[in-house]
Image (cartoon, rainbow, N blue to C red):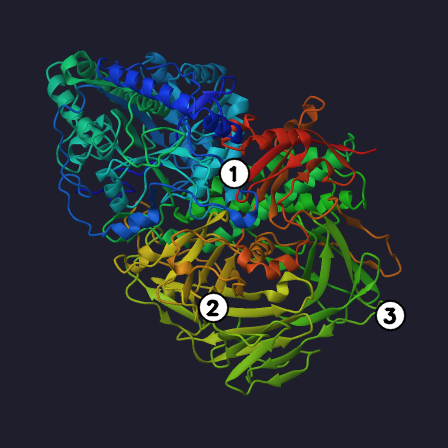
Amino acid sequence: MPFSSRRAGGGWAQSLLPTAKLATKQPRKPRKRTTAAFRDFVISNFFTIGLCCTFIFFLLILFRFTSVPKPLQFRSSVHRARSTRPRKPVVHKSPNDTILAAAVDITTKELYDKIQFLDEDGGPWKQGWRVNYRGNEWDEEKLKVFVVPHSHNDPGWKLTVDEYYDRQSRHILDTIVETLSKDNRRKFIWEEMSYLERWWRDASDGKRESFINLVQNGQLEIVGGGWVMNDEANSHYFAIIEQMTEGNMWLNETVGVIPKNSWAIDPFGYSSTMAYLLRRMGFENMLIQRTHYELKKELALHKKLEYVWRQSWDAEETTDIFVHMMPFYSYDIPHTCGPEPAVCCQFDFARMRGFVYERCPWGEHPVETDQENVKERALKLLDQYRKKSTLYRTNTLLVPLGDDFRYISIDEAEAQFRNYQLLFDYINSEPSLNAEAKFGTLDDYFRTLRDEADRINYSLTSEIGSGEIGGFPSLSGDFFTYADRNQDYWSGYYVSRPFFKAVDRILEQTLRGAEMMMAFLLGYCQKPQCEKLPTSFSYKLTSARRNLALFQHHDGVTGTAKDHVVEDYGTRMHMALQDLNIFMSKAIEVLLKIRHEKNDQNPANFEPAQTRSKYDAQPIHRGISAREGTVQTVVIFNPLEQTRNEVAMVVVERPDVTVLDSNWTCVKSQISPELRHNKDKIFTGRHRLYWKASVPAMGLQTYYVANGFAGCEKAKPASLRITPSKHLPCPTHYACSNLESDTVEIRNQHYTLTFSASHGLLQKVNHKDGHLNVVGEEISMYSSTESGAYLFKPIGDAQPVTQDGGQIVISEGHLMQEVFSYPKTAWEKAPISHSTRIYNGESTIQEFVIEKEYHVELLGHEFNDRELIARYRTDVDNKRIFYSDLNGFQMSRRETYDKIPVQGNYYPMPSLAFMQGSNGERFSVHTRQSLGVASLKNGWLEIMLDRRLVRDDGRGLGQGVMDNRPMNVLFHIIVESNMSSSANSVLNPRPLSPSLFSHLIGAHLNYPMHVFIAKTSEPISAQPPPRFFSPLVDSLPCDLHVVTLKVPRPLKYSQQPPGEPGFALVLQRRHWDSSYCRKGRSQCSTMADEPINLFDMFKGLTVLNAKATSLNLLHEDTGLLGYSEHFGVGAQEGHILISPMEIQTYKVQLQRQE
């Protein structure tokens, strides 16, 4: 059969990050654009320069037509410095609202507009055409073939990472070291550091030395070098940076190498965010594989499979990175040597009899190469190489040689190396073939390709290209949604296992908070006794980083692993969360000076307000007992870089309580009944206590919940309106009334929300200025018999599941108002209940937010082969165009196409999607976990919440998705109107940016306040002094985000030389749409248009020895990374000036001011 039932026709491989270089070697010259001074020089000497250029051009023409083709030279792994090609003048882009758009040759939107998606049968190359060649294509420049052996090692898929390591990966690494050491012509690449680090711990000194020698002599290249090969649809950019940094830093410290080539053969679609992050980490080249087969065909037809990837906002070409896209269906051997898999499979010598792999499904099988058949076999293989070469511009050809978990034994490796070397020897011995073939690494390939592109101009007429490398087109956009064949779109994994997608993001924000606390502990203490806690926790912090990194694997956060593997990922994340929460609970005591000394062995006096009993359990709020005459301390940590005014909430066991601030001043508060997903007992008997909190930027604030504190008003109970029912008795302490009308309303000072009383669904939003928005909330289900963990293949449209007669509870208080709905459905137990909340906190961003929380329980066989969605049928005239985010970093324009089925019009939504009408009105939905989103009709925005699928979808997993867990999905919805006239966004082909207010909403949702509660209460008479922690001199500008503040090497912090920067500060400047500025600016005092003084950022801390560095903390040559010159120079002077969209990293030393 033409396509194997496995993930690629023999197994899907997954490594997309090319070459490695020794850390001690010199990097290439910085890619600097033309400066103003250079422009002035050119203008003043224009005539002289013109004459010189004409003469040089004449010499080049003369040389071109009198020289003979150069032979292939395989250089050493030392990278030569390159000069950049002169390009357009630099345009400064500091003011946020004047950001420029990139000029490129190709956008993925234009490709989608052009391609008809007909899925035509191309013959032997099913998804292409019958490839032919004339035969003289290599007369002047011989074909240079690099066969790159590789083994794709998933850190978890059908087996757990430990199971794979014990059964396969450790043996593969042993095999590589032994077989490569026998012959220096043999090459190999390796990607996943999670396996290499484990092997390194187990390996003998001799094996380690051999490994390092192989790397140093260029036989073995580390590509990518992340902890895993991360998913690019669901992973947040914070986690991507974490997992890449964890792998790259371990590799540099252990092996002394820094990767410069990326290899991602198995992620299911590709994000332009990844290209940006890799560029800013010092990577030069990328390789990708899984893109829509029709896009591959279109790019191959025009020899554009290799291109320079440029960010959509980048008018200065500073983000350019070179990309090689593999042309065929899979990364396995049948689909990599050329366009005819039936032929290529004959050259997978591990499929010969005696090995464990399946035979070739096309009927012709590999045979041992010998002197009698070598000519016939070599010419047959070379024919495939030549055909594949015609799909690319240069005569340098890349041929991967591997598959999932290959090279597991010496015999297997020898079969491949032995047979291929015989074939290479024949090809290389025949000058008439004009070809040379060798084993190679990605570095060998990209270096030789760049050499050829320097010598021969492959640029097309009027091609914009790039100053990064000549001869190739430039491209912007992303590669979602991926389809590997027919109508099989991989949009199901955007939502599969949503419970663990939510845990992933909770772990991210908890790790970020713990990293900050460790940095502050070490920065402010700097005494041996103060370092006990952070240093004793270092091992657990490193473990937490690696457990988060592991889940970013493209079968982890995607939800596409076996049940027991998902359990393993979940257990690891749960353990990391427990460790981080214990550390933070102890750290707040030190930072608040409750205790001056503490180490990892002492019990904490605080615990998180929310805890989980096990890895797959929903978080439970710890109830404050609030006994008469006692007070319970509550500490709130604000992980954001601005002071936070926000309505906070804890759960109390009794309602007669009072809230006090750290000065023991009364704070107005509200209680509402705690509700749950149980139609027979919606009220739990506990209460939610709300008050308006104010917490310093990146700091701590203390509050007290007291019972019996004289002189303070007790928390005011909300008034309730409930559906008349025997199952809904009015809870004690509350005044209740019955719902009688067809519609119900709740309101604050900005909105009035209208709901259907029979269904409990949001219908309309009325603004205080009289403007009305139709929302039309709907809860529906798709049915499917072909969907699986990877694929979404619905049968028809989604059908509503709610019916008349559900139960509704309305809570109305002075701080929070809520409509809770347990809907009636066709099932005895509804698969969903939901709450809609609005807040009245004055001068908070919450007052502008509509909070939607869905409790989902897609449990039981009655929900088999169902996929649950929330749909908003609004009156926004968006023409089925919407915008969804890429990795929480940037937005991408999405358009619904009739020529593509429903599943192909679904896109990843890691954190935000919005629609914008022709009148500028926006409807935005923020999420704190990755989901899938679509706009299938005008004004509609639908988001998939969960999916339960019985069948395997034929991509190798061998099971459906049936391990659903109860979970909550939280959205923050905002409706905004454009404040200034602008062009119709529907006609704008480029991505739009969120408003500043929208950015702040997303930050508050994804980085919530951490609440800690004292384990024991104290008598009210024991009033401690005011306790708070405020580490910043002032809030940072509202468009500046602290991605992380951390101690990169906590295990080695105390051993580093004095003055060496021991801290890393990563900052991102958001770009925002200034035509939606009112609400955002009302919360902000400053923007990052002017430089920020790094030296004056922290209270009581001196910032020393600031250095600009790469995102992976390994390069200090900012020119290598594409940054402006000011980044490096400004860092030394303490000046932070960041262009919109950029992320910049600084190494600093923090020293306590005496």
Residue 615 visible (yes or no): no
Residue 957: x %, y % from top left: 33, 46
Whether tag 1 and tag 2 are in contact, CB under 8 A, the answer is no
- Asked if residue 467 lies left or right of residue 577, the reply is left
- Mark 2 lies on residue: 832
CB contact under 8 Å: marks 2 and 3: no
**Mark pair 1, 2: CA separation:** 35 Å
Quadrant occupied by the C terminus: top right
Nearer the observer: mark 3 or 1; the answer is 1
Amino acid beneath label 1: Ile
Secondary structure category for the residue under label 3: loop
Residue that label 1 marks: 241
Q: CA distance from mark 2 to mark 3?
A: 43 Å
Where does label 3 land, which residue? Answer: 711
Q: Position of residue 419 (x, y in %)?
A: 21, 19
Q: Looking at the picture, does residue 760 appear above or below residue 285?
A: below
Q: What is the secondary structure assignment of the residue under circle 2?
A: strand
Q: Residue at x 75, y 71 (%)?
A: 715
Q: Is residue 392 above or below residue 488?
A: above
